Each structure stands twice: as C-alpha cells, then as structure tokens.
Amino acid sequence: MILLAAGLLNRVLGFVPRIALPRMIGAEGVGLIQLVFPFMIVLLTIISGGIPLAVAKLVAEADSRNDRESGRRILKVAVTISLSISLAAAAACLILSDFISTRIMTDSRVHSAFLAMIPVLPLAALSSVWRGYFQGKQNMIPTALSQTSETVFRIVLTLLFAWMLLPYGLEMAAAGGVLGMVAGELAGLLVLWFQFVRDRRKPAEAESAGSARKKGYARELLHTAVPVTGSKMIGSLSYLLESILTVRSLTFAGVAAAGATAQYGALQGMVIPLLLLPGALTYSLAVSLVPSLSEAASREDWTTIHVRLHQSMKLAVMTGAPFVVLMGLLASPLCTLLYGNDSMADMLRWMAPLAIFLYMQAPLQAALQALNRPGTALFNTFAGAAVKLLLIVELASDPRFGIVGAVIAISVNMMLVTLLHWISVAKLTGFRMQPLDFLKVTLAMVVMSAAALRIWNYDPFGQSSLNLAVSGFIAILVYIVLIVMLKLVDRNDAARIPLIGRFFPRKPSS
C-alpha cells in the first residue's frame, strides 16, 4: 500500500512538467526530449530491467534463513554487475553520440540532450539495485521515499534548468530538461544511500551453517533478471522504434525535420500524457487485482475470479469514461488551457474515444499475470507493437496522413492489445462481461456529454478556463449521480478501490 500510494502520487506529480515544459520550450523542444527518452528507456531496461526483482527475490530468501550477511553479499554482486554494465553503456553512448544523434535520431539538435542523458545510466543502475534490496527485506518505505524525492526534484529542476538554458537555444533548453531528470535520479539515489547506511549499522546476525555462500550469486541474479529484462525489452524497443520510425516517416512524407520533431513532441509529450492520466486509477486497480486473483486461482475458485474481474473491469471503464468524454468534446479549450495553444487538439479528439481500451488493458494484463500467463501477455503486447510499427511506416510516410497516421497506428495498438488480452482471459477463465453494465456506462456518458456541451455552449463565463472548469465539474457531477442511480457502483465495488476502499467496508456475505 505504501508503494501504491507513492506510485499514484508520483504519477499525478509527474504530470506537472508535462504541462509546464511545453509552455516553456514548445512542442519542438519537447520533441527533442522525446527523441532521447525512448533511447534512455532501452538502455535502462538493459542495465536494470530485471535486477530489482532478482535482488528482491534472493534477499527475501536469505532473510527467510536469518542470513543477513548473504543479503549484503547479494547486494554487492548486483551493484558490481549493474554498475559495470551501466558504465560500459555510458562509455559507448559517449563515443557514439554523434552517430546516434545524426544517423539514428534524425535530428542533430538532439545531441546535447543525448549527452545530458548519459549520467543517468549509472545512477539509475544503483537505484534499481538498492530498491530491490529494500523490497526484498519487506521495507517499502525507502523505495517510496526515493521515488517521491526523485519526482519532486525532477519536476523542479527540469523546469529550472530548461528555463535557465532557454536563452542559449532550444537545443540547450531540451538538454536542461534532461539534466533535471538526471538530478532527480541523483536525489532518489541519495535517499536510498542514506537508508542503506542506516541499515548497514545494524549488526549482522550469526550465520547458520552453510548459509552465506561466496559463489553463485551472479549466476542466480542473471538467471532471474535476464528473462524479466527480455520481456521488458519488447515494450522499450517498441517505444524506441516508434519514435525513430515516426519522425523518419514524417520527413519521408515531406515534413521538415524541425516540423517532424515538433509534431512527434506534441503527440508523445502532450497528447499521450493526457490520455494516460486516468491510468493512475486503472493502474491502482490492477495492482490490487493481482493478489486476490492469484489467491482465487490457487483454489480454482472461478466464481471469485469472475466476480473480481467484473468489478475491476467495470471500475476501470467507469473511471476512464468521464475523462474520455471531456477530452473528446472539450479537446480544444483543454489544450489551450494546459499548453497555451490547441494545435494538438485534433489528435486528442481523435484518440480520446479509443482511450477506453487503454484503461481496460491494465486489469486484463494484471489478470494474465495473476493467472501465471505472463507469456500470453508478452505475445499480445508484441503483436500489438508489430502492427503499430507497420502502420506507422505505411501511414505516417503518406503525405495524405502524416502525423495522423501515427495517431491511427497507436490507436489500433491500444485496441488490438486490449482485445487480445480480453480473448486470452476469456479462454482461460470463461469470463464474460455483462453487456448491461456497458450500456449503462454508455448512457451515463451520453447524458454527461449533453450536460458538458450545454454548459459550454451556453457560455455563462465566456470562452474561458472558468467556463471549462464549470462545464467539466457539472458534467462529472451529472455522471456520478447517474452511475449511482443506475446502480453501477455499490459498497463492495468502492471497497475494491485502493486507498479509498477502507472508507467503504464491505457488507458481510450472508
């Protein structure tokens, strides 16, 4: 629950620079950062993708044997492996920075931001190892404090460095934004280091016979970490290839390099974060779903599995639906309020209706994980990524589509992966969603849409942010009243929602 609360807080706080940074450096500057970010994600996946899980697993096993010394030796081996790989990757990036910036990323102005990214590699490597160590010891507080510290420092310093370097050009401002990420990672690492020093001062307990082994830790770490890293690489590589192929396809369609970077920055740095904002709620639902489904699956209690799946899917749809309505209907004033212009409003308007598939995806993927079918989830994700990349090449390179082709490709990916997950879960469990609930949510969305448009077009406060806020507030209020009247949510459903569920104790079953 501590990690969940920290994760939700960080997701909400992380949206702050998503709003402020585009206002400061524009879509083109955001595009430069977005070209660097996927490359950094791939490197971080290689360096530390599966290490935290492996360290947590081995440290937990050592602690179960009352073998603290083995836990510390595991930590040392993991630090050595991660730091060695990260320093080698950093050196390779430094040597190949010109080639990567000009030949792979398509926009040579990204070079400064790419160089600014390099220090994050060893910092993130160390952070991931220490987080795994503390999680293995069932101490979630250091990880939560580290994540929150990293987020706060990243927000403040990203905006500060970008503002300070903006007079030196857009390229340097983008580099300043990346430096803020590095500084945030350093802050999180220092918190973990402080907690580790405190933990190390505790005297080690006497080892049981044969408990502290001196060899074999590296092999055990890699045995667990490599498969996890491999599964994460699909998403990371898909993200990297998406950025490269989108910009290259746009330039092939006749868009200038700067324009292609700006369009991609608007899509990935402004529109997609808005669509992902409700994901903080659906993510929390997914996290809470895994243990209950795993427990029910171990008992082969299919009735409970169906009930939990239905509750989670219904809540995911209900929480995402009002965001879909507001982002679709009021895309232009919303973008103007957040980003200072509405040039990306059409992209948001087109993608918003299909975002409901994205919100349904998290609980379905969590269900596959809980049912011990991670390979199925991996295959579905890979299939969706392959289709997305093919559509980007085919459509975004066509002058008739341009950036709209990338929008179509990402939307198809959202729908396809969700449908594949749904089919997989249905085959495994026999789960069927009750169509009446979908019809009720659709009715609530239609009435909410009418209320939002009525207030907005009535224009009591002028075409202003106040009018947008009032329209949105009244529309959401209407939506909440409707879902209660339609009996879409009851006390048991509310109790399933993390963080607030404790305020709605479940009725005892008769």
Image (cartoon, rainbow, N blue to C red):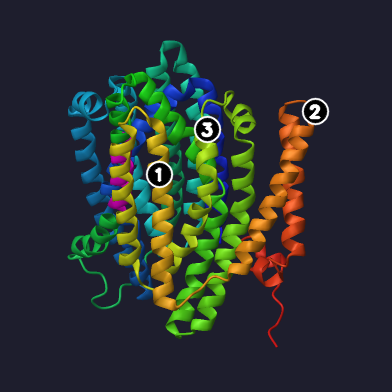
Q: Quick one: quadrant of the N terminus?
A: bottom right
Instruction: Tell which circle, 2 or 3, labels the residue nearer the N-terminal end.
Output: 3
Name the residue carrying label 2.
Answer: 461
The verdict on residue 388 being magenta is: no
Report crowding for label 2: few under 14, some 14 to 19, many 20 or more residues within 10 A (C-alpha).
Answer: few
Q: Amino acid at mark 3?
A: Asp
The correct choice, above or below, for 373 with respect to 105 in the image is below
| Callout 1 touching callout 3 (CB < 8 Å) | no
Residue 55 visible in rendering:
no
Instruction: Tell which circle, 1 or 3, labels the residue nearer the N-terminal end.
Output: 3
The correct choice, above or below, for 200 with respect to 428 in the image is above
Name the residue carrying label 1.
Answer: 410
Q: Amino acid at mark 2?
A: Phe
Q: Callout 2: helix, strand or loop?
A: loop
Q: Tell us which disc is closer to us: 2 or 3.
A: 3
Name the residue carrying label 3.
Answer: 346
Q: Callout 3: helix, strand or loop?
A: helix
- Residue furthest to the bottom in view is 510
Report crowding for label 3: few under 14, some 14 to 19, many 20 or more residues within 10 A (C-alpha).
Answer: some
Q: Quadrant of residue 230?
A: bottom left
Rendering coords of residue 125 (x, y %) = 32, 46
Per the rendered image, the range of residues in magenta is 232-243
Rendering coords of residue 328 (x, y %) = 59, 41
